[in-house]
Image: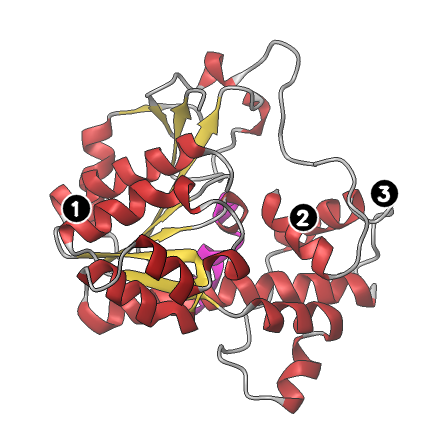
């Protein structure tokens, strides 16, 4: 949800209540996703070893997150370590940084710059804003083991322009760093309409509402940018590529998985953390390949 709040702030829409799945009475994830356990989206238990062995048959593993949850990032680092045990040649793609920060990432992994120097070179605060300490476990593990870190995103200014003018208008006057996104799945449009309504005085937008269409364009640009960068990282070396990104880009296959499929990339495994306060009613067979029960931070 934090990601949508950021988009809404960019496009000048008022912030209202979250529409993320929260607690529902006493029906909590403690009863449907045990802490430290894996379940399929339909609620079936999954053995961790069997799940991670699937890494041998895929090209991409997408790890969702809530950006300000430290426990989510510890989980991501642990999953990356488990994947590396099976596929030593892997890379980790990061939603947090635009492609212009790639040099800073390369120098950080190589040990040529310390954390303070990396944060300055990458313009972390300007590019992302969430405390780097939340992500330190992932960065430290990558640096220790020489795992390439890949900047997946585009500059915020481009996302802002598309959100204000639409993809076609921006593409008509400037060279876009990514291709035209695949059309969104109907379920994604419906979901984004709910998000938009929650931050636009509760008004559900019409499908042809120009402002809503621009909002969708901005979201698709974000998804497409990450999908293309993930695909390029895989094509460059045949590595397993792990994508670290907001859960909204992963859930139900709507965002990055859909854009990867449009690029002909079908070997994708989607994994999500599951907070104890989240309603069991949010589980569904298509939500992700597996979810993992998370304790408190």
Q: Residue at x 55, y 20 (%)?
A: 277
Question: Marks 2/3: CA distance?
Answer: 15 Å
Helix, strand or loop status at disc 1: helix
Give left or right: position of 64 versus 173. left
**Residue 265 seen by the camera:** no
Mark sitting earlier along the chain (1/3):
1
Secondary structure mostly seen in magenta is helix
Mark sitting earlier along the chain (2/1):
2
Q: Position of residue 22 (x, y in %)?
A: 63, 26
- Identify the residue position indicated by label 1 in the image: 84
- Identify the residue position indicated by label 3 in the image: 202
- Furthest-top residue in view? 26
Q: Is residue 255 magenta?
A: yes
Marking on residue 5: 2
Q: How many marks?
A: 3
Q: Is 34 drawn above or below residue 70 in the view shown?
A: above
**Quadrant housing residue 47:** top left
What are the residue bounds of the magenta stretch?
A: 250-265
Q: Position of residue 171 (x, y in %)?
A: 62, 84
Helix, strand or loop status at disc 3: loop
């Amino acid at each position: 949800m934090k990601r949508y709040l950021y988009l809404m702030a960019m496009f000048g829409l008022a912030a209202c209540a979250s529409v993320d799945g929260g607690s529902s009475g006493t029906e909590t994830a403690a009863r449907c996703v045990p802490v430290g356990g894996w379940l399929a989206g339909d609620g079936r238990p999954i053995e961790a070893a069997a799940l991670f062995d699937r890494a041998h048959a895929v090209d991409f593993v997408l790890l969702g997150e809530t950006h300000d949850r430290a426990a989510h990032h510890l989980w991501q680092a642990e999953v990356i370590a488990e994947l590396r045990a099976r596929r030593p040649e892997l890379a980790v793609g990061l939603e947090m940084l635009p492609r212009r920060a790639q040099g800073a990432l390369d120098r950080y992994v190589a040990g040529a710059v310390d954390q303070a120097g990396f944060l300055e070179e990458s313009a972390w605060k300007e590019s992302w804003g969430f405390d780097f300490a939340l992500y330190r476990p992932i960065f430290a593990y990558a640096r220790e083991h020489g795992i390439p870190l890949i900047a997946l995103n585009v500059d915020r200014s481009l996302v802002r322009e598309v959100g204000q003018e639409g993809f076609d208008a921006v593409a008509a006057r400037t060279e876009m760093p990514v291709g035209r996104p695949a059309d969104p799945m109907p379920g994604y449009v419906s979901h984004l309409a709910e998000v938009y309504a929650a931050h636009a005085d509760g008004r559900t937008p019409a499908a042809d509402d120009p402002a809503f269409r621009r909002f969708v364009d901005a979201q698709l640009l974000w998804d497409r940018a990450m999908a293309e960068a993930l695909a390029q990282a895989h094509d460059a070396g045949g590595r397993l590529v792990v994508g670290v990104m907001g859960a909204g880009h992963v859930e139900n296959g709507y965002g990055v998985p859909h854009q990867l499929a449009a690029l002909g990339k079908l070997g994708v495994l989607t994994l999500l953390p599951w907070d104890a306060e989240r309603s069991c009613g949010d589980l569904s067979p298509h939500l992700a390949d597996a979810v993992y029960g998370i304790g408190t931070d």
